[in-house]
Amino acid sequence: MRVSNTLSGKKEEFTPQDDEVKMYVCGVTPYDDAHIGHAMSYIIFDFIRRYLRFRGYKVKYVQNVTDIDDKIINRANERGISPRELAEQYTSSFHEDMETLNIMPPDVEPRATEMIPDIIKVVEGLVEKGYAYAAGGSVYFRVRNDADYGQLSHRSLESMMAGARIEVGEEKEHPMDFVLWKASKPGEPAWDSPWGQGRPGWHIECSAMSLKYLGETLDIHGGGQDLIFPHHENEIAQSESFTGVKPFVRYWLHNGLLQLGQEKMSKSLGNLITIKEALAKYSADAIRIFVLSSHYRSPLTYSEEALEAAERGAERLQLAARRKFAGEKTDKQIDIEAYRSKFIEAMEDDFNTPQALAALFDLTWDINKLSDEGYFVLDAQQFLLELADILGLVVSEEQSFEAKLKVESIVASLPILDKNRDIRIILFKQLSEQFEQSSFPALVKVASTTQEYALHVATIHEHIAKSAKYEDIKGTLRALSNTAAANIGSYSELRVQLRQVKQWQSADEIRAKMGELGIILEDTPNGTVVRYKTQLQS
RNA sequence: GGCGACGUAGCCAAGUGGAUAAGGCGGGGGUCUGCAAAACCCCUAUUCGGCGGUUCGAAUCCGCCCGUCGCCUCCA
């Protein structure tokens, strides 16, 4: 397996120190909802982690949460809440996003505020060794004492100075010196330290955390390319100076940045789309396929067209993986090993996911073709799911339409529920006026399930009106979901009966109305199949 | 100004010296089907930003030019 290492600027053979790969990825500063640039980065390190596991390595994955920082303090002040509350709120929002995107949680997820004693220990050590100095209640790292400074970003101290956008802090000995421990102003969160009240600088937490949970030398350290300088450069400086052990990191992996229009998507530019916004429009698999479609080191531009295309691709995989087949023929078989080789070969070469994904699509074609011809393809379908899983794609059967609604967006989606209820009732009325219940047994079922469905929607309205919490309506939501599924089933059943007696117009009416609700009824040689459109529409 | 990346079909995007330039999306035609959808079949880049050079041979290496982006300041 070969990986690109930012440190050497080359592709190198990947050989971890031992069976357990020590992997550290920079986490978020939770002061706002995460955007899809974050999604991209964490999806990338998620499939890298999954692939390493597939290759038989154990992986210990550590990812920090920077829960104390200027931006958190400022935002908390604006909102009139404590920095801790703000950080808590957005950390759990981030966790929700990660879970929905099928990103595996870190093995350890330390928070900066829980690491203060460890951080102070590292800062003290750096001062003792002459790599840092206290000034005005803060502590700075002395870059001139680090001969290797600039090794990761491939710049010299002189060339950094040439950039000239450097504020010369009066306290600093050298303009490039960076803060390890920051003296706090009155009213700011602060911890006691040998230098007075203060809080950790930005870079130091990662050094302290990785040292504590992964040891002096990590196998993989990941993050976005925007972190190379100064963040990761400074991490190397701190860690190697403190431990005296080199290298701090054996393989530095950096993902390309997500662009929106002509610019990088970033919090400071304000040109961002949050993960929640994206998930309201596209499935987790679609977002992942969008990311997998280009190499992780290349920049990627967000566009509705690209996400739309990814969504279609996700559907294609899903349909092939779960299509029902009646074929028994086995004299022609899909060469699963060939696909496995193609997939592995692609991933071994610096995680070439576009090629790996192509292997999945080729397999999809094979499955569809042989299945159409009446062959047994279950093993190939299972293999498709296996490969998809390594990339972190779910490719699962859709839950019922309503079950996809996110807890947070229940209120926002009430109009959708209403529309669904109304359409179902109208449709039922039309049908019952047209046909005798006795001639179509399924019509009786449609009556009861439609009524039940409408009842549940009304109940949810009542709960929301009384500003109930999620816990209170969880049961009703589950019931709604089940009823919706039963209701869809009964309409589908009725449609089958109508088709048997060639009542095409009514059958088509049912299909059209269901289509409006995001439900697709497909007639296949094996019967009518219910599918759900991946995109919700209001 | 310094450092780095990129420019491949209508769109997204692999391929980094050799045999027909992956794959996805879109578009056109066809098969199947009551219709629709899905699926399958055929077509959709004689050519890889431009100009030179190296080579038996280049999208792939070298030079110049044009264009785009990132980092150098908080950022995944």
Image (cartoon, rainbow, N blue to C red):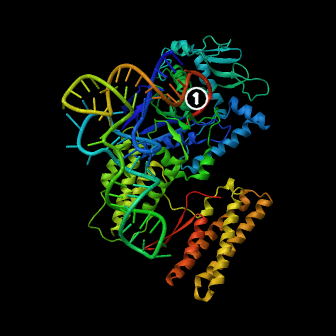
Where, by quadrant of the figure, is residue A90 drawn?
top right
Give the percent coordinates (x, y) of residue A314: 48, 54
Q: Residue at x 52, y 19 (%)?
A: A241
Identify the element where label 1 is drawn: helix
Q: Residue at x 42, y 55 (%)?
A: A386
Q: Quadrant of the C terminus of chain A?
A: bottom right
**Relative horizontal placement of residue A378, taking residue A191 as reference (left or right):** left
| Image: A504 above or below A364 | below
In the image, what residue type sits under mark 1?
A: Ala
Give the percent coordinates (x, y) of residue A257: 52, 35
Q: Is residue A211 visible?
A: yes
Residue on which the image places disc 1 = A208
Number of marks drawn: 1
Q: Chain of mark 1?
A: A
Give the percent coordinates (x, y) of residue A321: 43, 60
| Image: A327 above or below A86 | below
Q: Nearer the viewer, residue A404 or A420?
A: A420
Q: Is residue A55 visible?
A: no
Q: Residue at x 61, y 73 (%)?
A: A487
Q: Quadrant of the N terminus of chain A?
A: top left
Q: Residue at x 55, y 45 (%)?
A: A105
Residue occupying the far bottom of the picture: A438
Q: Nearer the viewer, residue A67 or A240?
A: A67
**Relative horizontal placement of residue A49, taking residue A1 as reference (left or right):** right
Give the percent coordinates (x, y) of residue A300: 50, 39
